[in-house]
Amino acid sequence: EDKVVQSPLSLVVHEGDTVTLNCSYEVTNFRSLLWYKQEKKAPTFLFMLTSSGIEKKSGRLSSILDKKELFSILNITATQTGDSAVYLCAVEAGSNYQLIWGAGTKLIIKP
Amino acid sequence: NAGVMQNPRHLVRRRGQEARLRCSPMKGHSHVYWYRQLPEEGLKFMVYLQKENIIDESGMPKERFSAEFPKEGPSILRIQQVVRGDSAAYFCASSPRMAGNTGELFFGEGSRLTVL
């Protein structure tokens, strides 16, 4: 059965710290891995990763995929209270269009 | 360009009643996906629809749940004879193409269903 596991489930850090969120997967016929940020409302798209070893960067956020070890990390540097959210990882696999979602990492940034 | 619109945002029903959740995709999007999110869990796929067609409903319970996406109007997720276990946030997402090709879905803000 395809599965996506995120860790940690929750994380509390202070403003200015750097955090690393993990997403590991076991799927058949991997196509892509996506990161979303979910605050109180809808998830918003952060990154899509398809190739191993190529870092994607957007401001203080960056992400990389390791297709050999079957995981991805999402890094956030110089965290701010506005980074507090649930970060969701999803993997697209197989020949269909379904995304398999992890349970998310709840990140709390304390001022 | 308005985003994905879902309504109602909050819906309270008693056990045995019906719940109807609506989703208007972004303009130009003909692919709609419904997801359910239970507390402390990730999003779970329910159904994928294109205009007038159900493409995949493998994530949707076979009883009491149905979905449609008519030629005109919003997509509707219908839950008949609701039970307490149906209480969840239901998210709709749309895409201009099959999500596998874009990798990006545009999500609505969700409809929170509470069953008393």
Image (cartoon, coloured by chain):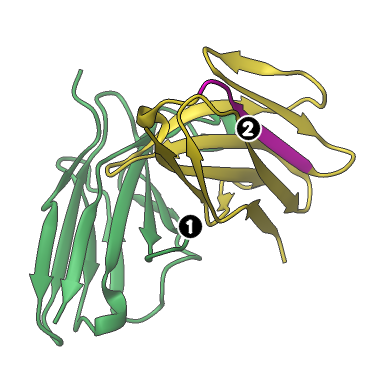
Chain colours: A yellow, B green
Main SS category, magenta section: strand
Q: Which residues are magenta?
A: A71-78
Residue B86 as seen in the image, left or right of residue A58:
left
**Of residues B95 and A14, the one drawn nearer to the viewer in this rendering:** A14
- Mark 1 lies on residue: B42
**Of residues B9 and B2, the one drawn nearer to the viewer in this rendering:** B9
- Above or below — where is A106 with respect to B58? above
The local secondary structure at tag 2 comes to strand
Can the viewer see residue B51 in this picture?
yes
Q: Residue at x 29, y 59 (%)?
A: B89
Q: Chain of mark 2?
A: A
Q: Nearer the viewer, mark 2 or mark 1?
A: 2
- Mark 2 lies on residue: A74
Q: Chain of mark 1?
A: B
- Residue A89 placement (x, y as % from top left): 57, 43
Residue B8 as seen in the image, left or right of residue B64:
left
